Amino acid sequence: MKFKHAFNVFVDNFIVTYKVLLYRVIILLFCLCLYTAVIFPFINSISDTSQVLALSQALGNFGSAFVNLDFAAMQVAWADIREAFIQLMEMLGARVGSVVLTVTIIVLVYLVQKFLLGLSNYTAGAMINDRMAMRANSPFIGTLIKNLGKASLYNVIYVPLSFAYDVIIFAVTGAIVVGLMNANAPLLLLIVLFSTVITFLYVIKMTFTTDWLPSLIYGKTTNRGAIAYSFNYKAKNKDFLAVLSNYVVLVLVMFAINVAAVFLTFGAGLFITLPASYIILISFEFVNYCDNNEIKYFMDKNTVVKPEREQVLTKEQFFKGDNND
């Protein structure tokens, strides 16, 4: 039921997708310029080396085999990639100073990028909350400015924690994959295992943080209170397995849609499917929060979801604005 309600809320707020798309394109173009200024000089310094040329050739062969679904050729190309990658690491080891400086700057730019993109997620959450609570069509820029302080504080906390979790995920998954590579495991097994582990670990993160944003926006709690509530699955009406299963379905469906957009529209569809993926996840967060806390909300202009026991606001809560953002 939550999945169905979240999809209906997403459709009702689909216009937010375009506003988020425009914002994200501007931010990504800005960050792309920064990445280019940092990466290109380094790439130019190693682009003519035999190690890079060998790796480029191996990747090209793998890509061609992947497009043709030629698993035998993919296996051969994968072995070439492993060998070329080992040689590349040996070459980079001799340039450790330049590598560390470049990686450090890239990480800093990435964190700035995630912070700026996170502002759009908070803004989209506030707009969806206004729509669910009051059928209000809040403007993107106005909502962003209004919530800039809260959104900034949220992302100052969330982005580093999320980045640390991502590093741990890829370190663990990479260690598993490297171990299986050394054991000469089949390439198809490595691909399936990598995607499965990554998906599961990201679903775990989303399950534990699902109530953080709604608690800040609708509940108007502090970040400490929102984190405590989000991670507390002993709280009333919170079902860890139900939320986990919904996120598994959402992530797999979004992954399938985005992959289809790559192959069926030559990547053009990603301009819609990627921001839409964020909007549907945020919609689920608010639906889940409202359902768990027995809060009435608009699913669309003709449908109001009413809990069995509706939460009644006091006069103080109403006039403080605790029922809306």
Image: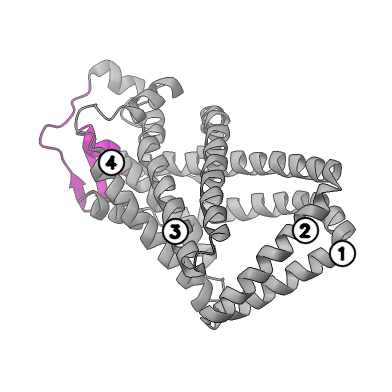
Instruction: Please state which of residues 238 and 118 is positioned toward the viewer in this rendering.
Output: 238
Q: Earlier in the sequence, mark 4 or mark 1?
A: 1
What amino acid is labelled 1 in the image?
Thr
Instruction: Name the mark nearer the viewer: 4 or 1.
Output: 1
- Residue 136: tell me if it is visible: no
Quick check: is 294 in the magenta stretch?
Answer: yes
Q: Earlier in the sequence, mark 4 or mark 3?
A: 3
Instruction: Report x, y in % for residue 91.
Output: 83, 55
Q: Residue 172 carries which label?
A: none
* Distance (Cα) linking label 1 and label 3: 33 Å
Q: Earlier in the sequence, mark 1 or mark 3?
A: 1
Element under disc 4:
helix
Residue shown at the point (48%, 39%) measured from the top left: 122
Residue under label 3, please give it: 193
Residue under label 1, please give it: 49
What amino acid is labelled 2 in the image?
Leu
Relative to 325, is 252 above or below?
below
Q: Which mark is residue 88?
A: 2
Tell me: 98 left or right of 296: right
The residues colored magenta run: 287-313
* Distance (Cα) linking label 4 and label 1: 53 Å
Residue shown at the point (58%, 33%) measured from the top left: 160
* Distance (Cα) linking label 2 and label 3: 25 Å
Tell me: 246 left or right of 70: left
